[in-house]
Image (cartoon, rainbow, N blue to C red):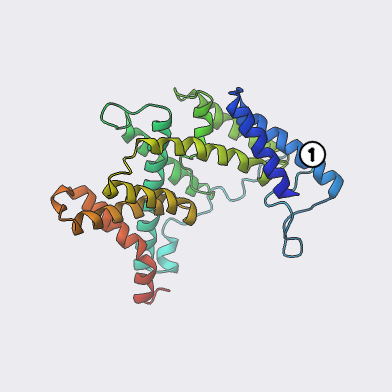
Amino acid sequence: WPIFTFCIGLLITIVLVVRKVKGAILIGILATTVLAIVIEAVAGVGGKTADNPTGWGLNVPAVPEAIVATPDLGLLGQFSLFGSFQVIGVIASLLAIFSLMLSDFFDTMGTAFGLATEAELLDDEGNIPHFESILVVDSIAAAAGGAASVSSNTSYIESASGIGEGARTGIASIVTGALFLIAMFFSPLVTIIPYEAATPALVVVGFLMMTQIRHIDFTDYSIGIPAFLTIAIMPFTYSITNGIGAGFVSWLVIKIFTGKVKEVNWLMWVISIAYIIYFAIYPIQVLLGLK
């Protein structure tokens, strides 16, 4: 039943997007959620467990007993700034910090450029206006998330759904943030939405992002192959960072072995070497006896 629900939700969302219905993705999520609630009420599918591998993947779509709930702020501020240095040591901590920094930076960069391209906000040179401000805000948000003992706050690729609805000026981001804040008090209502109702939206968002590959010159293998690796490795490894890293490193290797090293500027060398270290962090930790 969950797979059936996902397929129906995907078809509903696709039809609405193709017909250019305003709020197509939101309508698709809500319609699929209603379908999931009906299926759960009739069939009693239940959550996915070892004994029930075909159950709902994230939330069980059932009407909650209450709609409003007080948010649990018990973990707020429960962190130790230098605790990791005492627990796992200085070297392991520095490697972890490097890994997190690289991951967060390139996740943000990839997301920002992908969304800016989709929104047609790039300048004539292909750069994002005020990109430094984006990085500063993202960095502060990531640190604030850690201080609040929650997942790292960062830009998210799902913003493409808002861009598809016409978001351009930043007002949509403010509204989204306000709604997230309000949602803290309506967590029982939010948990009605099952994973199978949300993922169709991500599939459509993925399509919207993929439309940008038409600008890549795949006839030039030195560009096409790194681009392909970037696109392919992101979903295979569940990481934007890994995909970008594969693109950087493969591009550098191609330039080296085709005698075009002079075309590689110093920044590309730095980024590529940083990525090689990033990919080799686990073997390095094993070599140093940290794993």
Residue that appears at 45% across and 24% down: 168
In the displayed structure, does residue 229 sit left or right of residue 264?
right
Q: Examine the rendering and report whether any part of residue 231 can be seen.
A: yes
In the displayed structure, does residue 68 sit left or right of residue 104?
right
Q: Is residue 64 above or below residue 129?
A: below
Residue 96 in which image quadrant: bottom left
Crowd rating for badge 1 (residues with CA inside 10 Å; few <14, some 14–19, many 20+): few
Residue lying at the far left of the rendered structure: 262
Q: How many marks?
A: 1
Q: What amino acid is labelled 1 in the image? A: Ala
Residue lying at the far right of the rendered structure: 42
Q: Is residue 136 above or below residue 273?
A: above
Q: Which residue is mark 1?
A: 66
Residue closer to the observer: 82 or 127: 127
Q: Quadrant of the C terminus?
A: bottom left
Residue that appears at 68% across and 43% down: 7
- Residue 78 horizontal/vertical position (percent): 54, 53
- Residue 59 horizontal/vertical position (percent): 71, 48
Residue closer to the observer: 273 or 148: 273
Which element type, helix, strand or loop, lies under badge 1?
A: loop
Q: Is residue 290 above or below residue 173?
A: below
In the displayed structure, does residue 178 sit left or right of residue 89?
right
- Residue 23 horizontal/vertical position (percent): 61, 25
